[in-house]
C-alpha cells in the first residue's frame, strides 16, 4: 500500500494512548489467546476505546497473518491476522500497526482484536 496523506491528532480528531491499569484477557470459544496487565487503551475521537495487547502477552501460534491491510492517516498502515482458536477460524479478527506514526508510537508491537469476533474482558486493577 502506498499512501501519502498523514494527519496529526488534534482538537478536531483527538487520539490518546494510555496504560490500562487493569488486566485484559481475550478469548475465543473459551480458549484464552491473550492475557495481559500491560494493555494500552487507545481513544480516538468518538470511536469506542480499543485495547492494544503486547505481542508477548498473546498466543501467537493461534494467529495467521493475512494479506488484508488498511490505512489510517492518523496511525499508519495496519496488517491483519486471523485467529484459529476454540474450534473456530475468525478471519481478519486482529490488526496491528507495525510502523505506527509518531503520535501513536506506543502501539508498536501491540495487537488489537475486534470485539465482535472475540471476547475481551477487562478486570480493574
Image (cartoon, rainbow, N blue to C red):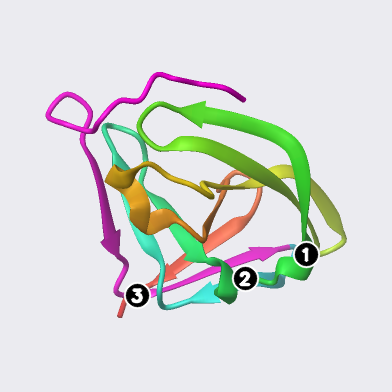
Residue occupying the point 58% across, 29% down: 70
Of badges 3 and 1, nearer the viewer stands: 1
In which quadrant is the N terminus drawn?
A: top right
Circles 1 and 2 in contact, beta carbons < 8 Å: yes
Q: Secondary structure at mark 2?
A: loop
Q: Is residue 117 magenta?
A: no
Residue occupying the point 48% across, 76% down: 36
Residue occupying the point 41% across, 55% down: 107
Q: Residues within 10 Å of mark 2 (few under 14, many from 20)?
A: some
Is residue 48 placed above or below 50 in the rendered structure?
Answer: above
Residue highlighted by disc 1: 62
Q: Secondary structure at mark 1?
A: helix
Residue highlighted by disc 3: 22
Q: Is residue 15 magenta?
A: yes
Whole-percent x, y for residue 119 in the image: 60, 58
Main SS of residues in magenta: loop
Whole-percent x, y for residue 40 in the image: 37, 62
Q: Nearer the viewer, residue 26 or 61?
A: 61
Is residue 52 placed above or below 39 in the rendered structure?
Answer: above
Q: Nearer the viewer, residue 52 or 76?
A: 76
Q: Quadrant of residue 17?
A: bottom left
| Nearest to N terminus: mark 3 or mark 1 | 3
Check residue 58 in the rendering and tell me which mark sits there, or answer none: 2
Q: Quadrant of residue 125?
A: bottom left
| Nearest to N terminus: mark 3 or mark 2 | 3
Q: Is residue 59 left or right of residue 87?
A: left
Check residue 3 in the rendering and tell me which mark sits there, or answer none: none
Whole-Å distance between the Cαs marked 3 and 2? 16 Å
Q: Nearer the viewer, residue 17 or 119?
A: 17
Amino acid at each position: 500500500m502506498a499512501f501519502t496523506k498523514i494527519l496529526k491528532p488534534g482538537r478536531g480528531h483527538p487520539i490518546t494512548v494510555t496504560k490500562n491499569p487493569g488486566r485484559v484477557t481475550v478469548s475465543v470459544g473459551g480458549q484464552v489467546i491473550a492475557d495481559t496487565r500491560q494493555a494500552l487503551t487507545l481513544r480516538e475521537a468518538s470511536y469506542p476505546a480499543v485495547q492494544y495487547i503486547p505481542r508477548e502477552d498473546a498466543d501467537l501460534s493461534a494467529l495467521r497473518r493475512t494479506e488484508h491491510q488498511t490505512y489510517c492517516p492518523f496511525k499508519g498502515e495496519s496488517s491483519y491476522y486471523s485467529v484459529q482458536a476454540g474450534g473456530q477460524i475468525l478471519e481478519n479478527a486482529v490488526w496491528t500497526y507495525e510502523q505506527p506514526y509518531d503520535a501513536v508510537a506506543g502501539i508498536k508491537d501491540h495487537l488489537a482484536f475486534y470485539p465482535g469476533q472475540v471476547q475481551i474482558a477487562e478486570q480493574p486493577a
